[in-house]
Image: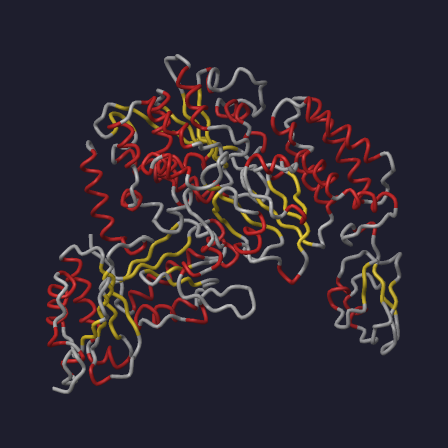
Amino acid sequence: MKSLSELEQIRKQTLERIQMRKEDRENEARVVVGMATCGIAAGARPVMMAFVTEASRRKLSNVTVSQTGCIGTCRFEPMADVFLPDQEKVTYVNLDEQKARRIVAEHIVNGKPVYEYTITAAMGVNTRGNEQ
Amino acid sequence: MSIYRSHVLVCGGTGCTSSGSEKLVEAFLEQLKLHQLDKEISVVKTGCFGLCAEGPVVIVYPEGTFYARVKQEDVTEIVREHLLKGRIVRHLVYHEHEEGAQNHLSLNDIEFYKHQTRVALRNCGVIDPENIDEYIAFDGYKALGKALGEMSPQQVIDLLKESGLRGRGGGGFPTGLKWQLCAKTVSDKKYVICNADEGDPGAFMDRSVLEGDPHAVLEAMAINGYAIGSDEGYIYVRAEYPIAVKRLQIAIGQARNYGLLGKNILGMGFNFDVHIRLGAGAFVCGEETALMTSIEGKRGEPTPKPPYPAEVGLFGKPSNINNVETLANIPQILIKGPEWFRSMGTQRSPGTKVFALGGKINNTGLVEVPMGTPLSKVIYDIGGGIPNSKRFKAVQTGGPSGGCIPESLIDVPIEYDSLVQIGSMMGSGGMIVMDEDNCMVDIARFFLDFTVDESCGKCTPCRVGTRRMLEILNRIVSGKGEEEDLEKLDILCESIKDTALCGLGQTAPNPVLSTLRYFRDEYEAHIREKRCPAHHCKDLLHLEITDKCRGCTACSRVCPVGAITGEARSQHHIDVDKCIKCDSCFNKCHFDAIIKV
């Protein structure tokens, strides 16, 4: 290595990979995928991997993808919750890999939830909570 | 380089390795492969997490779940439940010792970590110490780049002086001043030395830094070389630390490959390289002059100071010696600035200090707290208090050179000067906790036994004086102490302190002096009443069976010498002449009928 810029490059590259171990993670986005029996049976694993690979492809080092158990609405699986800083939790349902990738692009990167995939849309309830 | 969604960190420190963490790594890899998770989840072997009492320790990120005492057979469950399905395996999660304490699912909620500030240990248990990239990711070698690129050697020294960093090896000499003295000396060759000859019984701070974050030490040595004008460094490390040595070797190799050690570092025209020298385990070689003679290949014996190493050091050349923990602080001081460092700790002792907690304490392990933290906080809040609801009696700091601090002084803030005032010293950071069952005379005897063994024999006060002291102490604990012994001890202590050649001898009487000061009544009980108040000294106690005895015969069956007699269902009796005081009956009795008097 012959320069500081090379050092900086290694720093950035590796940090993307191990960011999640840092204590002061800034502006972290969290995706929690339902991975109970029901979720896995409905295809949650490829969905989760789609979140991981899409985030990694876009070099989003501030995204963590984790799993959770069954929350009881098994008919909507695969499901995922997306938490952004300063935003309310958004619950997505009936996911597939395609949808997961779109959620990363529109919601996590651009901050606009994909309304049509949310649980509120699926249950036929609009965002204000009134019956449609 | 692919991104993993989860990282499994397995502690690879000496403590956890000896309880089988290497096997855990294999088991994780195997199980992950079995469940086809090996592309999603990475397994990393890190340095020490600090909570050695609960090892082997495994931490799963991003959740930060803290699994303690993980056995090989638990791995299947963690992989199947946590990593595959995302359900934290609650019964394997670490829980605190207090009653009613909750299982803490995340690292940061645990009392043991909550009160700590990690500077020297910041990367221990977070990065893979055998991977230079991970060190670089967490701002590694940035300080070296900054020093070489933006600062003059004098600016580096000034910055260190301003930070107020003091030597963490024991004495607390200002590091910036030390560097200044060596920088001022004119010479064609200078050496940078890292003292990793950690010899205090029960201390393992430096080992953990070397095992968990070896690059931090290398980076600081290179900065040191730049500041004082040296191109060569030595790390003197104990051969008893095989994992630390191995990781240092790997780290040096990687740093050379990246051009961070060697010729023309970072293209900035600075040359610096580091060698490892293994110490054979002599305690005196932690003393800087003895350490240097040992590196030179001679018998490890101290020489009088002056001349100081900054003028005449290794191979007769000016040398700068710093301890591992001191060095580990330096890169961050350069990056974050002296104000940041001064914001921690106290006015006269800024920063943090690492302590190895041992003895009668629940959370045996490694902790790092800001200077000025009261001892009580370290022992109760972080250390989790004394096991088996025994009473706290004293804490020993500073190893064989330090002293015992009694319960009445437990709220004293930990800093160099306050500890010296109460007759102990910071030392390198060993902290041994004692409860009501420890006899303070015997503790003093233990440490003196150690110094007598480790005395190099060069000067008379240390070679002969400490031996005479040990003889007196042996007499006292075996019930043959005489009234004049205390006065003799006092005189011996003072004259050894004043006349010994090196630090080892000068501080050797400290354990005796401090116990004489705070626990004189225990000495007097041994000498005048032939009684050990802690019921520890075997020659001064005997076992008796009281009328609580139900005659269950458990004691007589367990006695190895047949000293206990008695009919079933009637009170038993111990033959004092036959009894070897092995405590077997004492531990066996279900009715608390056996007492020590």
Left or right: B174, with B547 as reference point: left
Residue B311 horizontal/vertical position (percent): 47, 15
Q: From the viewer's perspective, is residue B333 above or below residue A92? A: above
- Where's residue B467, x and y in %? 74, 31
Question: Can you say whether B355 is above or below B20 in the image?
Answer: above
- Residue B399 seen in the current view: yes
A28 sits to left or right of B252: left
Q: Residue B195, relative to residue B241: is it above or below?
A: above
Residue that appears at 23% across and 44% down: A11
Q: Judge whether residue B449 can be spotted in this image.
A: no
Model colouring: secondary structure
Q: Quadrant of residue B79?
A: bottom left
- Which residue ends up furthest to the bottom in the rendered image? A131
Q: Between B241 and A51, which is closer to the camera in this rendering?
A: A51
Q: Quadrant of the N terminus of chain A?
A: top left
Locate residue B373 relative to residue A95 in the image: left or right. right
Q: Is residue B112 left or right of residue A60?
A: right
In front of the other: B50 or B367: B367
- Seen from the viewer's position, the closer of residues B294 and A32 is A32
Q: Name the residue rendered at 36%, 61% in the picture.
A: B64
Q: Quadrant of the C terminus of chain A?
A: bottom left
Asked if residue B27 is positioned above or below residue B551 in the image, the reply reads above
Residue A38 lies in quadrant? bottom left
Q: x%, y% of residue B468? A: 77, 31
In the figure, residue B386 lies in which quadrant? bottom right
